[in-house]
Amino acid sequence: MTTVIKGGTVVTADYSYEADVLVEGGKIIEIGKGLSGDEVLDATGCYVMPGGIDPHTHLEMPFMGTYSADDFESGTRAALAGGTTMVVDFALPSPDQGLLDALKTWDNKSTRAHCDYSFHMAITSWNEQIFNEMETVVKERGITTFKHFMAYKGALMVNDDEMYASFKRCAELGAIPLVHAENGDVVAELSAKLLAEGNNGPEGHAYSRPPQVEGEATNRAIMIADMAGVPLYVVHVSCEDSHEAIRRARMLGKRVWGEPLIQHLTLDDSEYFDKDWDHAARRVMSPPFRNKMHQDSLWNGLASGSLSCVATDHCAFTTDQKRYGVGDFTKIPNGTGGLEDRIPMLWTYGVGTGRLTKEEFVAVTSTNIAKILNCYPRKGAVLVGADADLVVLDPEKTKTISAASQQSAIDYNVFEGKEVKGLPRYVLTRGRVAVVDGDLKSQEGHGQFVKRPASGTVNQALSSWKALTAPRPVERTGIPASGV
Ligand SMILES: NC(=O)NCCC(=O)O
Ligand SMILES: [Zn+2]
Ligand SMILES: [Zn+2]
């Protein structure tokens, strides 16, 4: 059976053109004018784009004494409803657990996924077993990205020596380290001081994580990665301090990518000063929302290419879960949702305002990350042979974001009341039509794991350069006798 998407404008990261797209067996089999198929999807007036890829989610994540409320079932359902056709979640070993053991848990959880998915592996401690298992994770499991938390002291945080060792191992394996870049030691000190001074509300969370802690950690991770000879991906870049470190490193030829979140781009720190405790606590995440200056920096980074991908860090907690932190902001589970809203929010506030072209939009929501994660052009492309993960986006379709109509399991939405213009008319996941004009027709368990090969082109180029410029002894003749 074939499906044809007819009469739309294909938008890629490179350019846009009018064409029909023919799909069979989950793949794109032809692109051109005047195509026909058994099933016809009318894309008149619409843009046909690669489905969104969200490189940063935490579905059913054990964290801060609870589990994030969206699991692979509700989370990937929300993803598809919003035009995201692949998510990359973080497999997180519990204390003393091996990597392969942790992966078994993630394999079990993810069987319910409605769309395709992959994993990053978190390095939350360092020992010989982890060193050894990293090879199996990369070579057998096709998981080539390793996350390091520089924050969450006493829980997930790793120290510089552990990070350097792990980064070097990534370099050997052709893998890419990721960092949550905040100085966890300073955050812990500031949090304790704020609490002692009676600052225990959700605004204390923002005070405890100023931009400097992020800028310092980002710069440190960049330098450690450079010394380890490995590229670096910085997750949830929220501020100019961190963006500046990334921009500077890129200009110096370092291989660094930065990922802002849709939340940081569109919501600011005034949210934490809301009189309603629940309102403020629901927006507690790390790093916290920032002011307009930082938001402008992130938008400019996307337009100029110094920042590469927009994610959500979807880690949703219910209001009841957030209330674990009444009287002590350090106990408010960190995280916000956004999977269903990333594409419409970025289209509205990015393309709709002229901050981004529609081609840049495709680059930062899909193509760039597919290239970084080395699954392009299977994912992130409208090309013959690519998976038919597609969004037919109607630029005239509008809605008001509301928790009442969302797929996510939580009882609120941080974007509540935002008017968005530009919504999916159709969403296809490997050829299966999962969304028709807002109606969800997705299937639990349809999602498949996406294996990714190691040693992508950037790893290859960087290791060639590091080998060429490695320290070498000077060949000398006539060395004088030792003075001893
Ligand atoms: N970002 C956040 O607050 N929660 C999820 C875990 C993380 O990415 O730090
Ligand atoms: Zn993080
Ligand atoms: Zn995260």
Image (cartoon, rainbow, N blue to C red):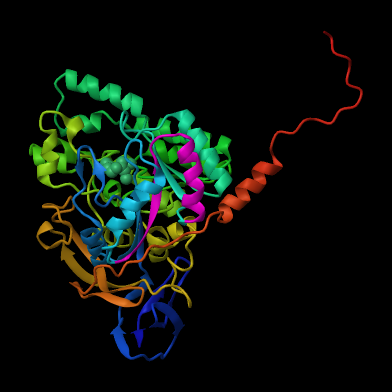
Q: Position of residue 59 (x, y in %)?
A: 26, 52
Image point 65% across, 42% down: which residue? Answer: 466
Image point 39% across, 43% down: which residue? Answer: 122
Residue 297 appears in the figure: yes
Magenta residue check for 129 = yes
Query: Which is more toward the observer, 371 or 44?
Result: 371
Indicate the quadrant where residue 327 lies: top left
Indicate the quadrant where residue 329 lies: top left
Q: Position of residue 295 (x, y in %)?
A: 32, 44
Q: Is residue 127 left or right of residue 114?
A: right
Query: Which is more toward the observer, 126 or 89?
Result: 126
> Over which residues does the magenta segment extend?
115-140
Q: Is residue 416 left or right of residue 227?
A: left
Q: Can you say whether 104 is above or below 40 in the image? A: above
Q: Is residue 382 left or right of residue 343?
A: right
**Quadrant of the frame with the N terminus:** bottom left
* Residue at the limit of the structure toward the left, as seen here: 276
Q: Is residue 159 left or right of residue 333?
A: right
Image point 30% across, 27% down: which residue? Answer: 187
Q: How many marks?
A: 0
Q: Position of residue 246 (x, y in %)?
A: 47, 41
Residue 311 appears in the figure: no
Q: Quadrant of ligand 1?
A: top left
Q: Position of residue 70 (x, y in %)?
A: 21, 54
**Quadrant of the frame with the C terminus:** top right
* Residue at the limit of the structure toward the top, as seen here: 484
Query: Which is more toward the observer, 387 or 291?
Result: 387
